[in-house]
Each structure stands twice: as C-alpha cells, then as structure tokens.
Image (cartoon, grey):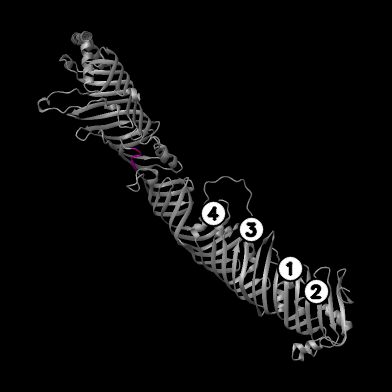
Amino acid sequence: MKATLLQIKDFLQSVHFKKYAKRFGLFVLGCITLLLIASGALSFYFNRNKPEIIAKINAKINENINGEFHIGDFQYKFLTGFPNFTLALKEVELKDKQWKTHHHTLLKAKEIEVRLNVWSLLQHEINIRKILINEADIYLYKAANGYSNSDIFKSKKKKSPENKSETETTIGQINLNNVHFILDNRVGHKLFDFDVASLKSKVDYDADDWQTDLFLKTTVKSLAFNTVHGSFAKQKILQGTFDISYSSENQKINVDTKGLKIGTDSFDIIAFFTVGKTNSPFGINIGTTILWQNASNLLSDNISSKLNRFNLKKEIKVNCDIKGDFNDQGDPRIVVQAEIANNELTIPDGLFTDCNFKGIFTNNFKPKEGFNDANSAIVLSHFFGKYQKMPIKIPQVVINNLENPIATGNMSSDFDIQNINEMCSDKWINFTSGHAHAGLKFQFNIVDLYITKPRFTGDVNISNASFDYIPKKIHAKETNIQLNFTQEALLIKQITYKHKNNSFRIDGKIDNFLNLYYDAPEKMVINWNIYCPNIDVKQFLGILKNSQAKKVAQKPVKNVNFSNQMRSVIEKCAVVINLKADKINYGKLTATNTSATIQMINSKLSLKNGSLQTSGGSIAFSGSIEPRGNNYTFQSNAQVNRVDIASFLRSFNNFGIHSFSPKDIKGKLSSHANVTGLINDKGELITNSMTGNLGFTVNQGALLDFEPIVRIGKFAFPFRDVKNITFSDLSGNVNLRGERIDVHNLTISSSVLNFDVEGIYSFGRGTNLALTIPLRNSKNDVKLASKAERDAVRERGIVLHLIALDDEGKMKIKWGKRGK
C-alpha cells in the first residue's frame, strides 16, 4: 500500500504531469472566458435589439389570440439556460375580449421564463425551447351560454401544399411551479381546481401530434364533475408521472399513469379527453387496491356521506370507470367494481364476518333514465358472510334508487338456532339447541341506510329447537317448525312443540302477514289448528301474564331491529286456535275428547264452542281468562250434562265448601252456570271469589253422612236412615256472591224426607237458610209414577219450619221461618 502511494506522489510531482495539468487549466479558463464573452455578446445583442425582440414575441403571441396580452417587463437572464437565450417575462396577464363581463383572467403570472434557440434567434426566428411558469394563476372559464375564455386562441389555418415545409413555432418543454389552475365549466356544472406545486413536461412533436411524460405534484382543491354533489379527492395531494399523447386528427388527449399517488394510496389510471368545441367527451378508468374508508373519502360528498356509514376492515380491489362530456350538465356515467375476500363488513345494522362478494355501483341502472341517485344501484353477487355467527348466502342482491333505496334478492342460510340469541338485544328469548334452514326471496326498504320492513317469500324450517321465553318463564323443547311465506299470507305448515308435560302439533295461517307484521301487529290474527295428546292447563297460565318491561331511559333509535319487532308482534297479535286434545288435566280434573276455539288478544284468552268429556259426563263451555295483578280472572258459561257429582266436586276442590265433602254426596250432576271468579298463579280456584248464577239437578243422587242433616235427624227422625239418603229429586238455582250463596228453590226429595231450602249460605259468617220440612216418611214417594203425584202428597201431615243460621261461627238450628 505504501509503495502505491509513493508512486502516485512521484507521478503528481513529475514534470510530465505538470505540463498536461497546466494545459488543461488553460483550456478550462478559455472555456469560461468564451462563455462569458458569449453571454456578454448575447446580453449586448438583447439590449441592442430588445425592441425588435419584444415586438416579434408580441407579434407571435398576437398571431394566436383574440384578446389582451400584457407584459410588465422583459429581462435577460445572464448565463441561465446557456447556450439558449433566456428571457424573463414579468407580471404577465392574458385576458379574453369578454373579461369585463366575467372577470376571470385566463393567465396571471409573476414570471414566465422563456428560453429561445440562439441560432434561430440570430436568423431572426423565434424557436422556444422551454417555458417556465412561476407563481401563476390559470383560470379556464366556460359560461352557461357556452362562451369560453379559452376561445382567445385562434384556430390554426391549414397549410397549403406550397407552404407545408415552413416551420412552426413549437415549445419543447414546459415547467410549472406554484401554479393555481382552475377549470370552471358552468355549462356542465364542473369545477376542477388544483394547486400545482410542480409540473415538468418535455414534449416530442410529430407534425401536429405530440407526446410527453409529465411529472405532476399538486393539491386537489376541487375535482367536481357536478358542483351540486361536491368534489372527488378533495384536499388530497396527487403526485406521479403521466404518459400523455395528443392526436390532432381525433382532437383527443390520452393519459396513462402507473402508481399515481393520491393521498397515501396508489392508483393506475387510463384516461382520454376530447378537446372539440361542440362535444368534449372524456373517460377515466381508475384501478387500485385500497381501504374502504380511504376510497370513500376520495369520492364526492353525495357518495361518501353514504359510504362512510359502512366499512370493510381489509383492503379491497377496486376499479372505477367514469365517462361523460364536459359540456353536459349533471353527473358523468360512473361504474365502480370491487372484489371483497375474507373481509369484515360493517353496516349500520351490524357486522358481517368472513365476508366474500363482488360489488358493482352504477349511477345509470336503467340506461335511458339518466345519471342520478334515483337511477343509481348497487349490485352484490356471490355474497357470503356471517351475521352474528349466522351464515348467509346471497347469489345476488340489487339495491336501486339511492334516493329511496329498495333492496331485492335471494338468500339462504343454515345455522344453529342458538346464534339468534346474539340478535336479541334485550334477551327476551334464549335458544339452547336446534337448527334452522331458510331459503327466501326478500325485499326491504333502506331508510337513512338502515334496513327497515324486510319482506320475505319462501320457506323457513327449524328442527329440534329448545328455548326459554323469558318474559313468560316458558321453557320449550323439541320444537320443529315449517313456515312458508307468500305475498298473501304466512302458512304455518307444521309446528311440533313440547312444553313441560305438554306436546302439540300445530298448523295454521296468518293472512296479510307481510303488511301487518310491521304496520299493525295488533291487527294480526294468527289462525292455528292445534292437536294435543295431553295438556296440563295450569302449566300454561304463565303464557297469559303480561311481560314485565324494564323501565329504562328511552333513547331515540333510527331502526327497529328484528328482535324488538318480533317481540312486539308476539305480544300484540291476536291468536285464534282450533284446539283438539285427547286429554286435558286441570288439577284433579281430567277431561277427554276436548275441542274448542280459543282466541288470545292482549293476554286475554277467550274460549268458544268448547266441549269435553269428564267425570262420566260431558261439558259444553265458553268463557275467558286474563291476568289481573298476580292472579287471573275468569268468566265461564257452562252446560254440565250428567257428570259424576263426587268426582266433579273433587276436581274443583269442592269449590271451597267445607261444610260437606265430595265423599258425602253421589249422583249425576247436570247444570248450567254463568260465573266469574279468580284463579291464583298456581291455577287454583281462589275460595269465595266466584260470582254469578248456577242452576243444577242431580239424578240418582245420595247424601252420605252429611252432618247438618244427621244433626237434625237425631231428634227429628230417630228411626230413619239419615246417614244414607237417596234422592229422587235434587235441584235448585243459586246466585254466587263471593263467600255467600243465595239459594233459590232448592228442592230435595229423598228417601228420608222431602224439604225445600231458601236463603243465604255462607262459606264464612252469615248463613241464614229457611228449611221447610214435611215430617211424613217419603221413603215410598219414589214409587209414585209421576212428579204431579209426588207433588200432591209432598206436604201432607206435619210440616216443620226451621232456620239454619250462623251463631258465632257455628251452625245453629231453631224453629221459625226466614224473616220472622
């Protein structure tokens, strides 16, 4: 290494090197001297010929304009752009002839630097090599009547064959620095406004055609194809290189750029612009991979304000095609296509995960109806996503008329029914098992970008579902449902359902379902046909309870979700049930062959045309039951035909009567009743709550060891069998008033004696019964052939008049008549 350095040192100090170094220095000095002399000569030439040069430039410009061109001053820039001759035009203004009408200056620049070819200049010709425009404003204006300040430029005359060889003035390179450019087209309501930080363009000419690679860095203040709707890419920095070419034959500019930066994102753009005076069609095709929010923020306000309510978490591949005419009013044709894969889609109503689909936006859905929001549409195809874990497939959905959007399409879904739980915001129902399949055509409105009033036609099948209906504390299991939605009705093909010890098979129909579901659920009538092998009535009383709504602060909501709407329908609709049951249990009552029409409205259950068999007889009934506080009030009209009286009384806990028990009586009871009363939350009759009228007869009756009769018989009929009394006639009418019963025409014809009863019987205090008792032995009255014969001998002999009344909680018998 040392040896090498020594050799270099010796070479630099050698006489040979010094000789050539001196010659090179003289050459450089000569070049500098020549440059200074040439520049000085050019400066001398400019100063001497300045009026002629200015005159020629003015003449050259005035040859091509119809307007006013003003230059504040000319300066020659010494050595700048050498060997070209560089002029600086200061305070340049260019105005058209109608400037005083519209006041938009076509060009206003602090400085325009023009570099002229020296050789051409010496030959008294102008050949512009380069133009630099610094600190300028360019305003291209087109009035509503079609006039444009760009018309200041005269059209070129076509060359004749004899002068085709003449050269024309061309501009080889254009640079812009800090230039504010505006294109204001009042005919088409278009406004393009750019702050150009830097523009560099070197132009290659081929006769009247030209081509350039243009570098541009600018801030987009407005890119409005329709000023009513706002600007695209507003306040975004745009930077990139454009491949631009011009065809004079077609009057068309073509633009191609790769990797153009708009904000933080890159775009590939292919565009064309026609510069004809009558028609100015243009087309822009943009391709990119971008985040949804970034893409939305590049669009005009009328579009981005809607799109910003949605979001996609990952980048999407997008292609946007814009075509229009600068001279046309309104929007251009816009088509946006996107591919979404393995993404998360957020909509105002919720979130779709694992999302895949292709989307198209067009503002010209029906080709002959213009480019506007009313004729805009979004088309999604091959959609798949999971909405709150519920997989949804949609081959195609069309959302058209973005002023009043309506979505239509087909969907299918297979999912475990438990996934619905996440859709129930107030947790009113909880599914624990089951599976669902849906295949539906749908249509729904979109109001403020929320889904409202979805309408379906198609089928929904649910199998082996178990759930808790929390407001009513109902648990159901092994539920199967087949539903068919039509335009006219909802057909309930089959529901199999189990609740505690009860099982049902249901089919039915809801007319006008799609309209009433949203607009008037209280008018909806569900017609069900229900067959039950077995029903325990007490287990169903909870269904009638009013839901206990939590009191929470009311917040305004813009949409009613599926969960809330479904709960509202369930609680408001009317249900009409045609019921058939093999067996019904109500406490100790067991009924068979039951049928009835049941109507449920606002927690009230009404029964019509009911019939059942129980206790060896039959009952026809109608009535109602509804919640009242913690209990239930019922009203019943019943016709009882020859039921076993002991069994019947046991079934109803002897109706709260404690003075005798069902074991004290036997026979076949027939009655008619119109009564009301209360049942507790366990389904048990509340003692002394009944009011109404009751008439009854007992056939083949017997009274066994009934204490009040036995007590009387001890001293009145010591030789008669008062512990085993048979009846040939036992009938009467009573008025129920809570704990008191008004007894009317109670007639008893028995094997011991006959007697009549009238008055008040109380389950508590206040009994006051008048008994009329003939003392004759009536044992053989049953042998008389007719009732008339029995009535004729009924009160022969001694007749006792007794009063049975309450004496401090004990039954007291005394002589006398009621009221005396």
Give coordinates of residue 170: x percent, y percent.
Answer: 20, 23
Tell me if residue 77 comes above or below residue 812 in the rendering: above
The majority secondary structure of the magenta stretch comes to: loop
Residue type at mark 3: give it: Asn
Give the alpha-carbon distance from disc 2 to disc 1, as whole Å.
Answer: 19 Å
Which SS class for mark 4? helix
Q: Look at 31% across and 19% down and name the residue there.
A: 93
- Quick one: label 2 or label 1, which is nearer the N terminus? 2
- Quick one: label 2 or label 4, which is nearer the N terminus? 4
Which SS class for mark 1? strand
- Quick one: label 4 or label 3, which is nearer the N terminus? 3
**On the picture, is 727 further left or further right than 639?**
right
| Disc 2 + disc 1, Cβ < 8 Å | no
Q: Look at 34% across and 24% down and name the residue there.
A: 101
Q: Callout 4 environment at 10 Å: few (<14), some (14 to 19), or many (20+)?
A: some
Residue ID for mark 1: 691
| Closer-to-camera residue (61/22) | 61
Give the alpha-carbon distance from disc 4 to disc 3, as whole Å.
Answer: 17 Å
| Disc 2 + disc 4, Cβ < 8 Å | no
Q: Nearer the viewer, mark 4 or mark 1?
A: 1
Give the alpha-carbon distance from disc 1 to disc 3, as whole Å.
Answer: 25 Å
Give coordinates of residue 171: x percent, y percent.
Answer: 22, 23
Residue ID for mark 2: 659
The residues colored magenta run 329-334
